[in-house]
Amino acid sequence: MNNPVRRPISTISTFGITYLKQHNPYMVVWWSAVFPGFGHYLLNQYLRATLLTITEVIINTLAHINEAMIYSFCGEFELAKGILEPNWTFGYLAIYLIAMGDCFRSALYQNKLYHLASLENKLIPCLKISSSEIQYLEKKSPILGVVYSFFFPG
């Protein structure tokens, strides 16, 4: 009797390859501290990451945080205090802390799921054929990746 996989370690779809792997939760929080939503991108939580990133940009703009930072770097602290919108600034702080806490929690939970999935020891699918396209895994050269990154950063 063939047992279905309860916890797949990866999936291939039209939108890409999504997989579970062991994450250092502090590294994920660091990326979220750099820019809210980036830690979620690292965890393959693309929808949540995009919503957090867009929300951060909008609230950052409405609170005038970047302008206040520029003034404070120039030593114009009174201008920096005067330009900040307090309600939006508290909203920015809330989004910032929620993003960091959520990605830390998600990283810990995904680590548990990865451990359980690896115990099942099922094969990783290497091919998916759908009506819209063919998805497959292939071995790539790291040297070629470095060359591409040199000419096309990001």
Image: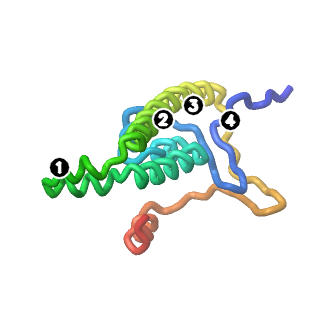
Label 1 sits on a secondary structure element that is helix
Residue corresponding to mark 1: 77
The earlier-in-sequence mark between 4 and 2 is 4
Residue lying at 27% horizontally and 52% vertically, measured from the top left: 68
The earlier-in-sequence mark between 1 and 2 is 1
Residue corresponding to mark 4: 8
| Circle 1 Cα neighbour tier, 10 Å, few/some/many (<14 / 14–19 / ≥20) | some
- Give the amino acid type for the residue marked by disc 1 in the picture: Phe
Q: Is residue 147 above or below residue 56?
A: below
- Give the amino acid type for the residue marked by disc 4 in the picture: Pro
Q: Using the image, tell me which numbered label, if any, was put on residue 103.
A: 2
Label 3 sits on a secondary structure element that is helix
Q: Using the image, tell me which numbered label, if any, was put on residue 114.
A: 3
Q: Does residue 17 appear left or right of residue 104 in this picture?
A: right
**Front residue of this view, candidates 98 and 149:** 98
Residue lying at 62% horizontally and 46% vertically, measured from the top left: 18
Spot occupied by residue 80 in the image (x, y as percentages of width and height): 24, 51
- Give the amino acid type for the residue marked by disc 3 in the picture: Tyr
